[in-house]
Image (cartoon, rainbow, N blue to C red):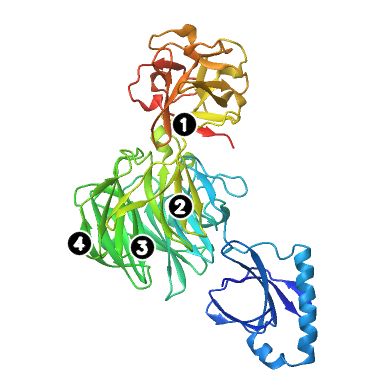
Amino acid sequence: MKLYIFRRIVHYSSRNVADTIGIREVNAQPVLPGILMLKCIIDRRQIRHIDFILCKRFTKNMEVHYDMAMNDGWLKKNTHSRRFTRRLSYLLALVLALQSIGMLLAPGPNASAAPLSVTNGIQFKDTNGNVVHAHGGGMIKANGYYYWFGENRNTNGTFKAVSVYRSSDLKNWEYRNDVLTSSSAAELNISNIERPKVIYNSATGKYVLWMHKENGLDYGEARVAVATSNTVDGNYTYVGSYRPLGYDSRDMTVYNDNGTAYLISATRVNADLNIYKLTPDFLGVESLVTTLWPGQYREAPALFKKDGVYFLITSGATGWNPNQAKYATASSITGTWSGLSNFGDSTTYGSQSTYVVPVEGSQTTSYLYMGDRWAGAWSGPVQDSKYVWLPLSFPSATSLAMNWASSITIDTATGTVTGVSTPDVWDPNASYQLISRKSNKLLNVIGGSSANGADLEQRADGGMTSQQWQITDAGGGYVKIINRSSGKLIGVENGATTDGAVIEQWNDGGWASQQWQLVHVGGGYYKLKNRSTGKVLDISSQSLADGAAAIQWTDNGGTNQHFQIVKVQ
């Protein structure tokens, strides 16, 4: 039985407990009807000096029950006294009163969460509505929450902070802290910090943060950096930076294998991938375990273990541009690793690996791939990057697969993560943005015009309704795309069939030149193929600039002909 503590009752009155008490171990036995004798361990210490505790528990079918618990020693001394009878009657009355006014209704962080949907290929927002900046990050679970650490950069790309967010359901992220900042140490004032990962050392009681560090000017420093904290989301104390055993180190991750920790790091200017064993305190490198795939240029490592098999995911080294992800397996981190095998599509659905999260629940454990869709691919700053999260599947004990899903459904209570792909179903009452894959800019009616014949362009997101579109069925597998501001349809000017013909808006004339087929090209991107001409919507000259014209062109597979279609929330 899981118990969730909400109130402490002392001398017939209620006192708010400042923070919900996290129970690690529970032994609850019925003593009298409605009364439980509770023994529990909190941070390895047995509860003392608590007379009564009100508890909330959830059954498997999510019925809610309220239980009362009291200190073991107090119970043994007072069960037969008149005071006990009086206190019990007062306590029962108090439980009913508190329940009736709703004071016992808020679940604690470990409470079962309903399944929630997470949209792929977008920027996530925290519970305050701000963009989540946790790029190149990783997660650790503690105190009933998932803590997500990642890069938070200045506009010029240099290090601002390692930020941390927490969530119990992997959708609603609460900003907690900038655990390390450019002012945490002199050598961080001007620097680059990438790929932050946190592991917990149970022997020292410390959370240890590992990172890739550069000097903020170039990528010649190639060091790891380390910081520690007594609490998962507290301020971390900077320990320092160095090259592990003298090797240059760039993209990296760390992995805690039941108390023995390892650093996996790209070295020799990304040509090789080294695995190092860490010192017992997790602060240093003890030895080089092995060098994997020399000369194959693998980076962005993510390591996890499933049913006794270790999986190591990596990407190729192509800068900001996504490429084919690969994986390898081993029965031991220090043993022989398999060769590299592909998974996902040729661009890993427009992402690069950063971490794999085990989602452990009452029914199963799912493995969630975390990827970054780096804004550098469209010449944008890191802070404009987006996130791609997808469930991994395992055809065999030593193989994995990953399919695209426009959104995923996560149930952290049961541990299930499933992909949801509905690329051909559009809500006619919703509004969508059409975002160029090449430039990350939005399809827009020039000047927000409502006139027939107004041309279309690309422009940075300004929150304007002229950048929002309704998609309605036109029959035969085609749709009409209607501007939310003007109510007019996207079409080819004069129904021209030539390359370079302008895309404009016009009242619905029922023409085939105003109808489009949305063809999924992978990774959540679509090409918009005109029903009349067979040509696709294109941003002229592959431009990245605001104001670049929207035209039609023969399909050539260019990213300036691919668009992400994102529902406006």
Q: CA distance from mark 4 to mark 1?
A: 45 Å
Query: Where in the figure is residue 450, as x and y percent of width and height?
Result: 62, 15
Tell me if 115 is positioned left or right of 341 in this view. right
In the image shown, does 217 or 376 lie closer to the viewer?
376
Amino acid on which disc 1 is placed: Asp
Marks 1 and 3 in Cβ contact (< 8 Å): no
Marks 1 and 2 in Cβ contact (< 8 Å): no
Residue occupying the point 36% across, 70% down = 258
Q: CA distance from mark 1 to mark 3?
A: 40 Å
Amino acid on which disc 2 is placed: Val
Choose mark 4 or mark 1, whichever is in front.
1
Q: CA distance from mark 4 to mark 3?
A: 17 Å
- Local secondary structure at mark 4: loop
Residue occupying the point 53% across, 61% down = 145
Tell me if 171 is positioned left or right of 186 in this view. right
Choose mark 3 or mark 2, whichever is in front.
2
The correct choice, above or below, for 478 with respect to 285 in the image is: above
Q: CA distance from mark 2 to mark 4?
A: 31 Å
Marks 4 and 3 in Cβ contact (< 8 Å): no
Amino acid on which disc 4 is placed: Thr
Q: Residues within 10 Å of mark 2 (few under 14, many from 20)?
A: many
Question: Considering only order in the chain, which callout, 2 or 1, is on the residue closer to the N terminus?
Answer: 2
Question: Considering only order in the chain, which callout, 2 or 3, is on the residue closer to the N terminus?
Answer: 3
Marks 4 and 1 in Cβ contact (< 8 Å): no
